[in-house]
Image (cartoon, coloured by chain):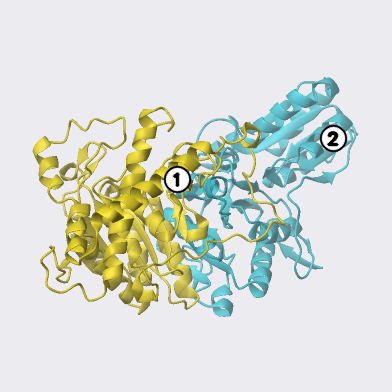
Chain colours: A yellow, B cyan
Amino acid sequence: MATSSTEVPSGPTAPAGPAHLTPGDRVGLLRAMLLMRAVEARAMNLYRQGKVPGSFYDGFGQEAVSVGAAWAMSAADRLCVLHRDLGAHLVRGVDPATILSQYMGREAGVTGGRDGNVHFGDRRTGCVGMTSMLPDMMLVATGMAMAFKLRGEARCALTWFGDGSTSRGDFHEAMNWAGVQRLPVIFVLENNQFAYSTPTHLQYAVDPIERAAGYGFPGVSVDGNDAEAVFEATREARERAIAGGGPTLIEAVTMRMHGHGAHDDMKYVPKALVEEWRKKDPIDRQSARVAALGHDVDALREEVRAQVEQATEVALAGPMPDPATATDRVFHPRDGEEILLEDGAAPWSGFGATS
Amino acid sequence: MTEMTYLRAISDGLRTEMRSDERVLLMGEDIGVFGGAFKVTDGFFDEFGASRVMDTPLAESAIIGTAIGAAVVGMRPVCEMQFADFVACGFDQLVNTAAKMYYRQDLPVNITVRLPSGGGFSGGPFHSQNPESWFMHAPGVKVVAPSTAEDAKGLIIASMRDPNPVVYMEHKHLYRRVKGEVPEGSYETPFRARVAREGEDLVVIAYGAMVHTALEATADLAGASVMVLDLRSLKPLDEEAILGAVRHCSKVVIVDEANETCAAGAQVAALIAEHAFEDLDGPVVRVATPDCPIPFSPPLEAAVLPSVDRVREACRQLIEY
């Protein structure tokens, strides 16, 4: 029982803007996507210079999925963010210098060098960092939503996961649990066509969006390269969740434009497929819309570029962590303060923010 | 003080904490209306309602995974695995998500996972295991294992109040077999070892059901004075108490009901070898279940689980050494 998303303007010539996005929101979506791409491009450069240990993983071409969905979430909502979803961290208020420090394993990184890449969540922004067993986070998000419902709070949890995650048992356990308890949780399936080198036809026989009906809640497929479409689908899902309507599965159809990690030359992906998706670049699409509003996109790009350069300088100047601290903080002290997730930034105008 | 069984003491601890802390939430299979496979939560549904005594889908990964999510937004979930063996289905959430959350992102995960463990009643290979060492090997998880009714209550309360993931090993064979005086109201048992019996000539180090086996085996050992040390906490291990007891007695027998390789007792033996070698008057002796699945049929099961006779014989030989 898959349903399609409501119509949203799909090009720069759309006569009227989408109902729930102000011009400021539309610029804000573009700015967050530009920032994600610029931070990741800079980090890839640092990786090639040997300043990022391990490998490097990015979400090039998928910026609309994390930015669009995060834009619809309130400060009190909670998010489980995956490794292609840097945009969500930026929307929630994590500073680019902190992110670049994180990539380089520096003390000022979100995890202080204890974990790498986008394997982080800044608890001060209401985000839980992923584990590498990605659909694990579907259950964590479901548990947050369970607590919200038990306490009668008008809040919602959201988690991203990939096409590969749909094969794991935790995908089923989370979807089933959320359906049984009608929880305020949004599952965003970021379908980027490949789980490392494995294409979706080797991953599932039935489109995962069709499975939502089997768990008793709606599945909505959207263009994952359209930030405004992803936002609108998430906004509707959130509204339903807060009203007691239960979970929603959103499939954001997109394409992984880079290798799984910087070490992966992606030769298993047909070049024609990449070329086809390059024409659907989410930043180009949003740039055209913003330009049509009369906004100076080039100036915005320059502003973002300068911000990332400055953040890079800050990150490079920061120290590496002290080896003597490697075994510290395995356990929280019994008499320590209670530490919970805190509210993050919620820039959508619908929550009263002015972009 | 009230006399009650080990099982009722667990219930009493859960109930006491639930009455004083609204954040405590019980989750598990058949724990609500039915009161749990062993009746630990009998009557809880009526007192606390379906939302705090939650009958969950049959999905261990989901029980632990959702508990983690609830914990980081302010709840204190207590997960019941119907049998300790079933925690294997939730292993990843516990050792990867919960255990490392604080280390990686400064976010403590206050969950307690109750594991009804142990054999001795023909439970067979999937209802008899003692998987405590799986979690001792996962940094970020604490592991406790009470042997008495008083400690069963005090340790479950302390586990719920500990801000970290705690695996609470409750031995099924002690549920109704062990009774004791239990203080009324709320109290905590520290995650430290306890001297179950003072002694001079030899110390038996054990935990859970094996404390009772050790006490019985050494009650009358040809006049020898045998100390029994009840570990109570396996992670962290009370190294001071272990080394102190070995220095005091100079001979040590370590008993595990778990399979021998890498069991809790193996860590205790390593600790003694490393830090108390000069204090020993004999080899470190271990008694444990051999490395085989726990068989179903009574004579087969009895052949593998450490018995009173096996422990007694090990002690007798070491004293004569």
- Quarter of the rendering occupied by the C terminus of chain B: top right
Q: Is residue B133 left or right of residue B208?
A: left
Q: Quadrant of residue A229?
A: bottom left
Mark number, residue A311: 1
Mark number, residue A346: none
Q: Is residue A23 left or right of residue A96?
A: left
Task: Say what amino acid the circle numbered 2 marks.
Answer: Gly
> Which element type, helix, strand or loop, lies under badge 1?
helix
Q: Which residue is mark 2?
A: B244
Q: Is residue B149 left or right of residue B165?
A: right
Q: Is residue B150 left or right of residue A13?
A: right
Percent x, y of residue B56: 43, 65
Does residue A57 appear anywhere in the picture?
no
Q: Nearer the viewer, mark 1 or mark 2?
A: 1
Q: Nearer the viewer, residue A273 or B64?
A: A273
Percent x, y of residue A67: 31, 58
Q: Quadrant of residue A40?
A: top left
Residue, x 27% and y 58% (percent of image)?
A: A30
Percent x, y of residue B204: 78, 36
